[in-house]
Image: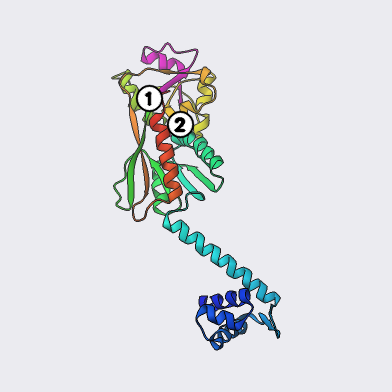
Amino acid sequence: MLNPQWLRTFTTLAELGSFTRAAERLHLTQAAVSQHLRHLENELGLLVIRRPRQLELTPAGHALLVYCEETELADKRLRLRLSGADTESGEISLISPGSIGLALFPMLLALQQAKPGWVVRHRFAPDSEVLAAVLQNQYELGLVTLKPDDPRLAASHFTEEPLELIVPATQTDIHAWSDLERLGFIDHPDGQAMASRLLSRRFPGNPGVQTLRRQGFTNQIGLILEPVARGLGFTVMPRYARTAFARQDAIAVVECGPPVVDTLWLIHRSEWPVSSFAARAIEHLRQHFANAEPA
């Protein structure tokens, strides 16, 4: 690595074109300026041609000057970012469960459109992968449905999301367990667990979701409601996944009594603060969910 003092001497010499003036500005002797230049030229080759009334940079000298300018800019960007003052550029990296992710991703893209210097990196994943990704510094922010007790993670309330029983719009007459048996169940990775929690409210003492005829399965969060919209069965899933579905006229939500609500926790590494631009994004998203009307 090149000595920073030698580089400061070189850039000053290139700017002023004089050993005498460079020495005066840097509060050095002319001999020290010449020594710094000699050290650089020993490593990089001839940098300056000494002429009677001026100094001329060689191609290597011009290349070193560009390097010094780029290094100075990188140093300024680093200091600005670490100071927390830079909220106009940077990467927002977020990993979340699929349902809330369907709601968040369009909002993040809207933020990126408003702030072209921001870059959004988002991934869908279950709780276990979210925890691992944040702990391993692969993502700065994560959302989970269970509050972690790991001291390396800071967790704060983000929003709440109820589970919903969703049926084809043409088959909303659901009064008994037999009506669900008739429709059949559209399953997904969390389907049976979610259905067991919600349906126990509407149909206490039911024989269990596993007894229902399974009409289909998909692990793609955005496709779970497609077979429901086509009249092939019912499912149970979180509200934000349902509201993100394009064909709302083809599905319906059946009331199941007292809501079953999951709390979503925002997590990040507790040892250091969230970046300034990520903090602004979090504030915007929280405000959106706080003001959102139940759909």
Q: Which residues are magenta?
A: 164-189
Q: Is residue 156 above or below residue 81?
A: above
Residue for badge 1? 209
Residue for badge 2? 188
Identify the residue at image location x=44%, y=15%: 182
Coloration of the structure image: rainbow
- Look at the image and say whether residue 178 sits in the magenta stretch: yes
Identify the residue at image location x=38%, y=27%: 163
Disc ID at residue 168: none
In-image side of 259 versus 86 (left or right): left
User: From mark 2 to mark 1, how far is it between C-alphas?
Assistant: 13 Å
Q: Is residue 6 above or below residue 198?
A: below
In-image side of 114 versus 259 (left or right): right
Q: Which of the two discs, 2 and 1, sits closer to the camera?
A: 2
Identify the residue at image location x=43%, y=33%: 288
Measured as percent of width and height from the top left, residue 133 is found at 43, 50
Label 2: few (<14), some or many (≥20) within 10 Å? many
The residue nearer to you, when weighing 265 against 32, is 32
Q: Amino acid at mark 2?
A: His
The residue nearer to you, when weighing 72 against 94, is 72
Q: Would you identify the image quadrant in which residue 44 lies? A: bottom right
Q: Amino acid at mark 1?
A: Val
In-image side of 235 versus 20 (left or right): left
